[in-house]
Image (cartoon, coloured by chain):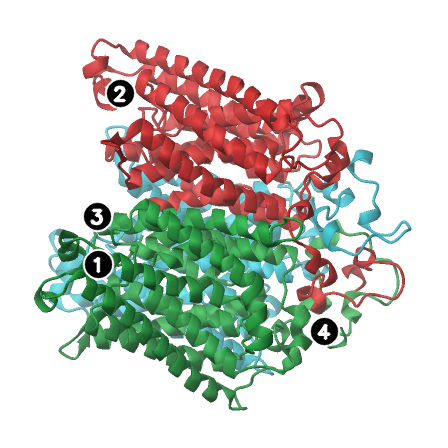
Chain colours: A red, B cyan, C green
Amino acid sequence: MVFVGFGFLMTFLQRYGFSALGFNFLLAAFGIQWALLMQGWFHSFKDGHILLGVENLINADFCVASVCVAFGAVLGKVSPVQLLIMTFVQVTLFSVNEFMLLNLLLVKDAGGSMTIHTFGAYFGLTVTWILYRRNLEQSKRRQTSVYHSDLFAMIGTLFLWMYWPSFNSAVSYHGDAQHRAALNTYCSLAASVLAAVAVSSAVHRKGRLDMVHIQNATLAGGVGVGTAAEMMLMPYGALLVGGLCGGLSTLGFEFLTPFLESRLRIQDTCGIHNLHGIPGIVGAIVGAVTAACATPDVLVHSFDFEGLKQNWTAKTQGKFQIFGLLLTLAVALVGGSVMGLILRLPFWGQAADENCFEDSVYWEMEEEKSRAFPEDTTLKPPAPPGPSGPSASPGPSAS
Amino acid sequence: MVFVGFGFLMTFLQRYGFSALGFNFLLAAFGIQWALLMQGWFHSFKDGHILLGVENLINADFCVASVCVAFGAVLGKVSPVQLLIMTFVQVTLFSVNEFMLLNLLLVKDAGGSMTIHTFGAYFGLTVTWILYRRNLEQSKRRQTSVYHSDLFAMIGTLFLWMYWPSFNSAVSYHGDAQHRAALNTYCSLAASVLAAVAVSSAVHRKGRLDMVHIQNATLAGGVGVGTAAEMMLMPYGALLVGGLCGGLSTLGFEFLTPFLESRLRIQDTCGIHNLHGIPGIVGAIVGAVTAACATPDVLVHSFDFEGLKQNWTAKTQGKFQIFGLLLTLAVALVGGSVMGLILRLPFWGQAADENCFEDSVYWEMEEEKSRAFPEDTTLKPPAPPGPSGPSASPGPSAS
Amino acid sequence: MVFVGFGFLMTFLQRYGFSALGFNFLLAAFGIQWALLMQGWFHSFKDGHILLGVENLINADFCVASVCVAFGAVLGKVSPVQLLIMTFVQVTLFSVNEFMLLNLLLVKDAGGSMTIHTFGAYFGLTVTWILYRRNLEQSKRRQTSVYHSDLFAMIGTLFLWMYWPSFNSAVSYHGDAQHRAALNTYCSLAASVLAAVAVSSAVHRKGRLDMVHIQNATLAGGVGVGTAAEMMLMPYGALLVGGLCGGLSTLGFEFLTPFLESRLRIQDTCGIHNLHGIPGIVGAIVGAVTAACATPDVLVHSFDFEGLKQNWTAKTQGKFQIFGLLLTLAVALVGGSVMGLILRLPFWGQAADENCFEDSVYWEMEEEKSRAFPEDTTLKPPAPPGPSGPSASPGPSAS
């Protein structure tokens, strides 16, 4: 039951074929092991042994989720070796940042708006900014989707969507807080879908929808309530946050991503800035506000206002939440810069600008070329004599 | 764990591309919010507040499942605006009907054979009957599947199949009733698969199987035991019901759907009459019979024969189950007629007869035309010299 | 929650289209019912009734998993009738073998390294060895994957991967043993992914990865810890086993499968020898060693060293584990031989050598031919006038 929330890590990026799936799989498997060690050292180290439980696995998953977010920014532009190095460094920084936030600043962040999404997004964006590829437009035609790859991506979206409530509530205290986290996330996600559809239709000249928005912005609501999910956000608060994030995210895809790419030289393959960056910051602020407005009896229950925090007020908690956000951004930007500089070294086997977003650089695909579409032979016309490949086939309207 | 049963709402109709997935997503997100309100007012309204729990979310899911069923009948023929109106009205009627059945008639319907499937199916069928499109055959060639879309649909089928036991047992009493519901559903589904394969092969001239039957009729068993799942149906009863429903459903696809379409002018895109309509009625009758044959000690446990129902006998319960079915049908037919008349108004942005089942009416797909199949270029024969084929297209930089 | 582990049965073989999915579905539905009866007779028969619980369903699933493994070896080469007969026989033998191992030899095998994987693999391999098709290379061109079918297969891989920990821990004692089983499986799977990627890249001349390895060898770690998962394997032990299995499995795909096919005449369609055969044996041996090295207090807890086994030492347990493996192999080989000889009888409707791996033998696909690719019309160039539409295609026999 505990491992169910997992799938999302894997189906996350199904739209870019073998590399997206395979490398994501690879980095997740590697990242989880390293995260188990890192987080074990920080949180459950005792007598020279790391105590391992199911809880640790969930936390390692969370950590790897952050790496997958960052992977979204550099997708198609880095080699597997670069990815493994990036995973190694990011997991380390994630654990340090998480330790500072949760154990030193005593911040609450159950769904990881800050620790996972904001950190992952800005880390990845900084890396991709430093790895800027001047001639990427040579690979531009491969950086799009086709009909079926969009359907594959929707599997990932729906899978993420339906497990997000479990995800946000996984490490909350059992009982009320956990149910509250699930309910809030649920409401926020639903509002996010409506907002994404509405805005997507509104920004299009003819009122049509864009699949990219549906695939991504519908999830922004889940990111946006990450921090506040277990707090007393109330359903209408969750609906509001979800709608806001869904709308902002869609607008981001439409206007901000092209701007970032053309002006700031940030090539954000999956648009993680819109799905994780902005909603993550919104979520952190929502969390801070919710915490600052909490009533005293909520504070003792939800925020452990005992022991160390005996003299805290709700406002102190809110302030520290904001400190947590700023610290996360700082760690992400500095860490991302260093990471990017390391990855710019020329010997990591990265692809040339004109070979980005191309599976055959890293995958064995010769067989397929020679035996292309064996299954589909029944559905396709025999190759006509002459120079015209299947792309020149007359199409179904002749039938 | 609770939210797992969800996926089915979403993967339900993956076979008709962007619109099926996207609109289903949209109506589910909208429907859930409205269902939470409606059902909250009916069932858990206290002191001016709606008490919200995980149970409510499950019930809202069930309600939306009914909308998705109806969506199957009109799929490809209505605009998103029409869908939202339909969702709004159907959720309202569903809640009223459910309230009358469960709280006034004291009927049992754990898996929703009546409230979800029968109601959804006949509501949808009535709507599509009134929205009859005379020239739909102009779009007929798009109303089929291709190899890959059938595989996508199988994802939905398998997902539904494996979560159906959880679905039918979700709102049963914990403990025995819940386990019984899961086991009965399981047996029924398994029998349904065998019956569907057998009948599908039998009705084909050369003994071949039809993918449509496998995708749909295999699930009929789950619908058929919806009402009786938590009752003392016994495994052999479940096997019998499952086999019956699987067989009837396959026969329905083969013979009834064409008949309905040509004679009764009911254009049932997904064949919901076979998957939800007939098995739903069968399920309601099975439930009534099982209830009427229950022994006294079962009655007190499973049917709460205390308080209001102190003087009831098993037969009374059986009779009321049948009343419930008739009431459901009445509400569905009347509600569907009114709904259909409203949706016939010409200003909802519906597509013309020749543009049904077409994604590009509602979705932005220009990019794909010019950048067609970028991923597949590596798998295809090299582009021949000359102007023919997408591989020779000038690329996105021209767009 | 209990039924979640199920999906794996279904998504297991998504890469060979309709037949793989449909027949797998069919045999699973049939096998589960027969397994419920068989296992019921062996394990929970009381007073002329079989007591049925959720536990029984899980065990039936396990049994069917074994059939699915064997199905992988003969995939594309047997008719549905042959499959049903094979399922019937294999479920029977599985139950007998499982009864002998668990109840007579008192062996431990929570994740089924022996009972499920080793048995299934060698049973299937023996059957396919006897069913050797001399002219299979006439169908060879259809025995490969295309870009999208590989992505479908990855859905299955990821689904299996993420549910494997639940699978291996499903029938362990609740509490510590269950958590231990999940954690060990998890570590082993993660190590398996890294090993598979590393070896896959190492054996390729240019360092490229092969999708087949990623799809299969990444799961070998789960098979390898099947027996030992609930024992005191320790995480580093699990990592070691996982890495070993992942590596061996990849090497098997690269070198052993072609060797088996060309020299030993074993045509192993899915390479189950590499994914289930070798790791299954490794898992059984690891289980025996772990058992033989267990400390006394572990023995009483994990191995029930009470009652019958009071005089056993750890070494006795280890010895019996090995006996269990040998017995399993014997049953698989003998049973598979008999099964193969029965299936060689010429009247089961098997396809000719040149029609293997072909859906249209068993599935109705005419519609698709004439209406080919209706969805894709928006993505394709407009049809030129001329008689050469897909509907005019002569069908697969000409290709």
Query: Within the image, what quadrant is residue B254 found in?
Result: bottom right
**Residue under circle 1?**
B177
Nearest the viewer among C347 and C142 is C142
Query: Within the image, what quadrant is residue B277 found in?
Result: bottom left
Residue type at mark 2: give it.
Answer: Phe
**Residue under circle 3?**
C176
Q: Give the chain of mark 2.
A: A
Contact (Cβ within 8 Å) of mark 1 with mark 3: no
Say which residue appears at 36% left-offset and 67% top-offset. C116
Q: Give neighbour class at mark 3: few <14, some 14-19, many 20+ (Cα, 10 Å).
A: few
**CA separation, marks 4 and 2?**
67 Å
**Are tags 1 and 2 found on a single chain?**
no
Residue type at mark 1: give it.
Answer: Ala
Contact (Cβ within 8 Å) of mark 1 with mark 2: no
Contact (Cβ within 8 Å) of mark 3 with mark 2: no
**Are tags 4 and 1 found on a single chain?**
no
**Residue under circle 2?**
A303
Residue type at mark 4: give it.
Answer: Pro
**Residue under circle 4?**
C396
